[in-house]
Image (cartoon, helix red, strand yellow):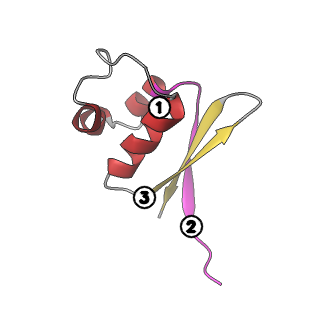
Amino acid sequence: MTIIEFENLGSYENYSLLVKELGLEDIFESVWGETLEEHELVETEYEVIRQVLNAAEDDYILRMNEPELEYEVLLIE
């Protein structure tokens, strides 16, 4: 069995804070074709975050904590 090592990057209350804190604004713009400030949320926040993390160079795990509606991000090392 292989154990995946990871770093817990933190919990975030919304997608824009998560993108800014992780420094993924450029990735966001390339995925969504507009800046974070210009983006009008039509899809779910989870979907926005998922697509941005999938496009990033690093490998992330995204977890959503249902009761608090927070997103937890782990960086796979």
Q: Which residues are magenta?
A: 1-15
- Nearest to the eye among marks 2 and 3: give it: 3
What is the number of the mark on residue 59?
A: 3
- Nearest to the eye among marks 2 and 1: give it: 1
Q: Which residue is mark 2?
A: 5
The residue depicted at 43 percent of the width and 34 percent of the height is 48
Dot 2, crowdedness within 10 Å: few (<14), some or many (≥20)? few
What is the number of the mark on residue 18?
A: 1
N-terminal of the two: label 3 or label 1? 1
Dot 3, crowdedness within 10 Å: few (<14), some or many (≥20)? few
Residue 9 within the magenta-colored segment of the rendering: yes
Residue, far right: 67
The residue depicted at 51 percent of the width and 29 percent of the height is 45
Picture layout, residue 55 above or below residue 45: below
Q: Amino acid at mark 2?
A: Glu
State the CA–CA distance, disc 3 to disc 1: 15 Å
The residue depicted at 48 percent of the width and 37 percent of the height is 47
State the CA–CA distance, disc 2 to disc 1: 21 Å
Pinpoint residue 75: horizontal percent, then vertical percent: 49, 54
N-terminal of the two: label 2 or label 3? 2
